[in-house]
Image: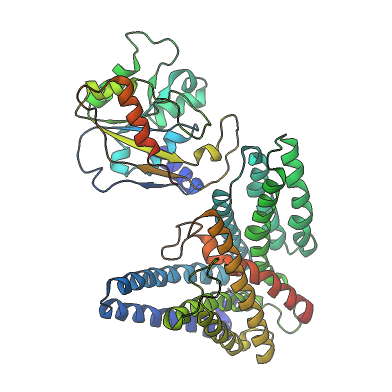
C-alpha cells in the first residue's frame, strides 16, 4: 500500500484516470457524430477497446497498489491465459499432453514463485535451461516421434513467450536500484504504460494518417505513418514520465525507444504466427482487443530487454 | 450448488463459450441436443454453456456401466448432474435407452445425447446410431439441435487423467427435424452432417 502514499504514483494514476476519461468522452462524441457505416464500425470497436481499457487499467492498478505478491499473481494469471491461447492455436500433438501439463501446472507456477521470492538466479534459468531441456525429454519418453522437433519447438516457444518473457515485467520489482529502493512498482508502471501507449498511439496515428503499409504480408493494419508517429509520441511520453523512474529524461527517452521498438517487433512476430495459422486474433476474451496474447504481444518482447537494460546500467 | 461450482470451474478452465443461432432458446418445447463425443467432459461443458434456466431442465444421457462404476461417479451422476443413465451393454425392451430418454422429453425436459455411441479420437465423428432417429419419430414436438464441441479432446483425451487448459467452444446450429419418408440411415447421415457443418474451419 506504500504506493498510495507516493506522490509521484498518485500523479501517475491521476493522469491515467484523466486519460481514460478523455478517451471515453472522445469515444462518446465520435459515436454521435460518425455517420458512415464503416466509420461507425470503427467507432464501435474503438469504444469497446476504451471500455476494456478501463478494466485492464483497473486490474493493473489494484494489483500494483496491493503490492509485490498481487502484481506477481496478476502476471501469472496473464501468462496462464496467454499460454492457453497459444497452445489452442498452434497444432499440438496428443503426445505432448504430459509435457503441456508440466508447462501449465509445474513450470508456470515455479517460474512466478521464483519471481515472488526474488530468487533471480533460478528464475532467469528455470525456463531457458531446465524447462527447455525437460520438455523434449518428456516428449521423447511419451514415445511419439511424429514432427518431434516442430512439436518440441512450439512448446518451448510457448514457454518462453507466454511465461518467461512476460514474467520479466513483475521481475522489475525485484531489482535493487540505488536511490530508488521501495519504488520499483513505478518502474513497472513505466514499462506497462509506455508499451501499451505505444500500441495505442500507433493505432491512432495509423487510423488518422496511415497510408503506406509497413509489413503488408504480416500485419495489414500496421502503417509507416502509424509506426513513426506512434513511436515518436510514445518516446516523448516516456521521456515526460522520467520523474517516476530512476532515469534522467534522456535515459528515459532511450529506454522508451527500446521498449517501443521491441513492442512493435513483438506485435509483428505474433502477427506472423496468427497469419500462418489463418486467424486474426489469438482469442476473444478482451472485447475489441481480441485475446490476452493480442494485448500483451508487445509486452512479451519489451519486458525482457527493459529489465536487462535497467539491470545492467542501473543496479 | 455443487453443479454450479463445477460448471463454473469447467468454464473457467476451458474458457468455453457457447454460440447458438438467435431464438434457439425461445420456444418452451423440449430439446434434444446431439453432439460429437471425444471426451468425458463433453456433456459437462455443453451443459455449462447453456443459459441457467435451460440448463436446469436439461439432462444428459450417460452410460450406466461407466457412471455406476464407483461411489464418486455414482454421486456425480445422480446428485450433481442428474444424468439419465442408459444401458449400453444389455439392452432389453424394458431398459431401452430410447424409451428412457423419451420419458424425459414427455416430461417436458431436454436431453443431451452423443449419437456416436462412444468416444472416439478421429477428426470426423463416427456414423450416428439410430437412437436419435427413434427419438425424432416418437417425439415430433422436440427440437433437435446439432452441437459441435471443439477442442475438448485436447483438454482430456481418452486415456489421460490430467486435463490441460485449451480454449473450447460449443457451437449450436438451427434445429433439424425428420423429413417425411426419410430412412433411418439417411436421417442419421444428415444429422451427422449438421453437426460437422458447425465445425470451426
* Colour option used: rainbow
Rendered position, A55 above or below A150: below
Quadrant location, the C terminus of chain A: bottom right
Rendered residue at 36%/34% (across/down): B193
Q: Is residue A31 left or right of residue A21?
A: left
Residue A304 showing in the rendered view: yes
Which of A42 and B45 lies nearest the eye of the viewer?
Answer: A42
The image quarter containing residue B59 is top left
Quadrant location, the N terminus of chain A: bottom right
Q: Is residue B72 left or right of residue A71?
A: left
Q: How many marks?
A: 0
Rendered residue at 41%/65% (across/down): A288
Q: Where is residue B85 shown, x and y percent of the image?
A: 39, 21
The image quarter containing residue A83 is bottom right
Rendered position, B74 above or below A63: above
Q: Where is residue B199 shown, x and y percent of the image?
A: 42, 42
Which of A239 and A87 lies nearest the eye of the viewer?
Answer: A87
Which of A69 and A33 lies nearest the eye of the viewer?
Answer: A33
Q: Is residue A110 left or right of residue A16?
A: right
Rendered position, B108 above or below A227: above
Rendered residue at 57%/71% (across/down): A64
Rendered position, A9 above or below A264: below
Q: Where is residue B80 shown, x and y percent of the image?
A: 41, 32
Q: Where is residue A146 shown, x and y percent of the image?
A: 68, 39
The image quarter containing residue A313 is bottom right
Residue A248 showing in the rendered view: no
Amino acid at each position: 500500500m506504500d504506493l498510495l502514499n507516493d506522490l509521484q504514483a498518485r500523479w501517475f494514476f491521476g493522469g491515467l484516470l484523466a486519460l481514460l476519461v478523455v478517451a471515453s468522452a472522445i469515444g462518446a462524441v465520435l459515436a454521435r457524430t460518425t455517420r458512415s457505416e464503416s466509420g461507425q464500425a470503427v467507432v464501435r470497436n474503438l469504444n469497446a477497446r476504451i471500455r476494456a481499457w478501463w478494466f485492464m487499467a483497473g486490474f493493473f492498478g489494484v494489483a500494483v497498489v496491493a503490492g509485490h505478491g498481487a502484481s506477481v499473481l496478476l502476471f501469472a494469471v496473464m501468462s496462464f491465459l496467454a499460454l492457453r491461447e497459444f497452445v489452442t492455436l498452434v497444432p499440438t500433438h496428443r503426445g505432448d499432453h504430459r509435457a503441456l501439463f508440466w508447462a501449465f501446472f509445474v513450470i508456470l507456477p515455479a517460474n512466478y514463485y521464483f519471481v515472488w521470492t526474488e530468487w533471480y538466479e533460478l528464475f532467469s534459468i528455470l525456463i531457458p535451461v531446465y524447462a527447455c531441456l525437460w520438455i523434449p525429454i518428456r516428449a521423447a519418453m511419451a514415445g511419439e516421434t511424429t514432427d518431434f522437433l516442430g512439436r518440441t519447438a512450439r512448446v518451448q516457444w510457448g514457454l518462453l513467450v507466454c511465461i518467461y518473457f512476460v514474467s520479466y515485467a513483475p521481475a522489475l520489482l525485484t531489482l535493487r536500484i540505488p536511490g530508488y529502493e521501495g519504488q520499483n512498482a513505478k518502474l513497472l508502471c513505466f514499462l506497462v504504460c509506455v508499451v501499451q501507449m505505444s500500441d495505442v498511439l500507433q493505432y491512432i496515428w495509423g487510423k488518422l494518417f496511415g497510408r503506406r503499409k509497413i509489413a503488408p504480408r504480416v500485419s495489414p493494419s500496421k502503417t509507416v505513418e502509424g509506426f513513426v508517429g506512434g513511436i515518436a509520441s510514445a518516446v516523448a511520453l516516456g521521456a515526460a514520465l522520467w520523474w517516476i523512474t530512476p532515469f534522467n529524461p534522456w535515459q528515459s527517452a532511450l529506454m522508451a525507444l527500446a521498449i517501443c521498438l521491441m513492442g512493435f517487433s513483438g506485435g509483428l512476430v505474433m502477427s506472423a504466427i496468427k497469419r500462418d495459422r489463418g486467424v486474426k486474433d489469438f482469442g476473444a476474451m478482451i472485447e475489441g482487443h481480441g485475446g490476452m496474447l493480442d494485448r500483451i504481444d508487445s509486452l512479451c518482447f519489451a519486458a525482457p530487454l527493459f529489465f536487462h537494460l535497467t539491470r545492467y546500467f542501473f543496479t | 450448488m455443487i453443479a454450479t461450482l463445477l460448471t463454473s470451474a469447467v468454464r473457467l478452465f476451458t474458457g468455453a463459450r457457447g454460440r447458438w443461432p438467435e431464438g434457439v432458446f425461445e420456444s418452451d418445447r423440449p430439446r434434444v441436443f446431439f453432439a460429437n463425443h471425444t471426451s468425458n467432459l463433453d456433456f459437462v461443458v455443453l451443459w455449462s454453456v447453456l443459459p441457467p434456466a435451460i440448463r436446469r431442465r436439461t439432462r444428459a444421457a450417460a452410460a450406466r456401466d461407466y457412471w455406476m462404476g464407483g461411489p464418486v461417479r455414482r454421486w456425480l451422476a445422480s446428485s450433481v448432474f442428474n444424468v439419465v443413465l442408459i444401458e449400453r451393454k444389455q439392452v432389453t425392451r424394458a431398459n431401452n435407452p430410447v424409451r428412457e430418454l423419451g420419458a424425459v422429453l414427455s416430461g417436458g425436459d431436454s436431453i443431451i445425447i452423443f449419437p456416436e455411441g462412444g468416444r472416439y479420437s478421429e477428426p470426423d465423428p463416427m456414423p450416428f446410431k439410430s437412437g436419435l432417429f427413434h427419438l425424432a419419430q416418437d417425439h415430433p414436438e422436440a427440437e433437435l439441435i446439432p452441437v459441435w464441441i471443439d477442442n475438448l479432446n485436447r483438454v482430456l483425451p481418452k486415456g489421460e487423467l490430467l486435463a490441460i487448459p485449451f480454449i473450447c467452444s460449443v457451437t449450436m446450429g438451427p434445429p433439424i427435424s425428420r423429413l417425411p419418408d426419410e430412412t433411418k440411415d439417411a436421417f442419421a447421415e444428415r444429422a451427422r452432417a449438421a453437426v460437422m457443418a458447425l465445425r470451426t474451419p
